Image: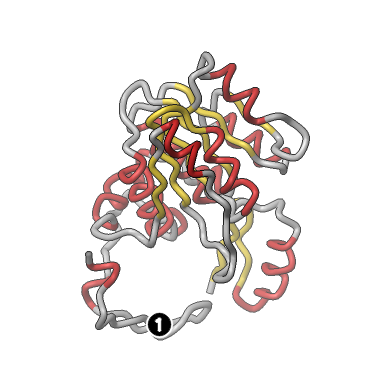
Amino acid sequence: MEHFCQDQARASGSFAEYAVYPESAIYALPDDISLEAGCFIEPVSVAIHAIDIAGVRPSSTVAISGAGPIGLLCLQVALKAGAARVMVSEPVAGKRDVAKKLGSDVTADPYKENLKEIGQKLTEGRGFDTVIEASSDLAAAKLAINLAGKCGTVVWAAVYPVEAEIGVPPFTMYAKELSIRSVFVSPYCFPRALTLLPKLDIKTLITNIIPLRDIKKAFELHETRKPIKILIQP
């Protein structure tokens, strides 16, 4: 459980030209992985950890809420793990288009469409084996419980406000025999992420590359919710 180590050595900072890291946190990029793709080692490791926890296996049905970097990487890793039917919910049309391009069978706007009805149709009325919430939206985290089928697994793979609470209906948990899991960083997943990177479509996720001197513009662009991943270039 290295991600819960009580004596961690942290890096010196971010958005800087240089940073100091402990040697154990350094991974050399192979020649076939660009620096731009290498930036995704950490989010790919999170996606791997999420799919591990979710127990996605061949023929699984999976719902993913949020088509940001983590959601779209979870989509790709879930497909690599054998997911047969996948629904991605995302309010931004451009991101839904990317999810469709990356292999999602169905995409939906959670603000305008009934996700439960769409999910029931995709899963032939059974509900999803796995529901991964990657948007940080509390309503989506709660809806995930209703999207899951019997003996399904709900994975909250986002970061939520510290004081936030979500009501979980005990009878639904009892009747469906559900499991609710969460994801906290990615223990022992960096080497696996490094191996998997060349097999994933990373280029499509990079929507902007902005120089460090213009980082304010990067944050302003991020607030529009249109970009998927903005890279900061020293």
Q: At label 1, which amino acid type do we have?
A: Ala
Residue 177 in percent (x, y) is at 38, 34
Q: Please state which of residues 26 and 181 is positioned toward the viewer in this rendering.
A: 181
Q: Number of numbered discs present?
A: 1
Q: Please state which of residues 38 and 85 is positioned toward the viewer in this rendering.
A: 85
Residue depicted at 57% across the width and 48% down the height: 141
Quadrant of the rendered image containing residue 105 = top right
Residue depicted at 22% across the width and 77% down the height: 23
- Residue at the front extreme? 171
Residue 222 in percent (x, y) is at 68, 62
Residue depicted at 62% across the width and 37% down the height: 89
Question: Can residue 206 be seen?
Answer: no
Residue depicted at 62% across the width and 54% down the height: 138
Q: Please state which of residues 234 and 110 is positioned toward the viewer in this rendering.
A: 110
Q: Please state which of residues 55 and 8 is positioned toward the viewer in this rendering.
A: 55
Q: Say left or right for 129 vs 223.
A: left
Residue 41 in percent (x, y) is at 37, 57
Q: What is the crowding at mark 1: few (fewer than 14 residues within 10 Å), some, or many (at least 20)?
A: few
Q: Say left or right for 98 vs 187.
A: right
Q: Say left or right for 138 vs 191.
A: right
In what quadrant of the picture does the N terminus appear? Answer: bottom left
Question: Can residue 33 be seen?
Answer: yes
Q: Please give the residue where the numbered disc 1 appears in the rendered image.
A: 19
Q: Secondary structure at mark 1?
A: loop
Q: Say left or right for 43 vs 2.
A: right
**Display colour scheme:** secondary structure
Residue 25 in percent (x, y) is at 27, 71
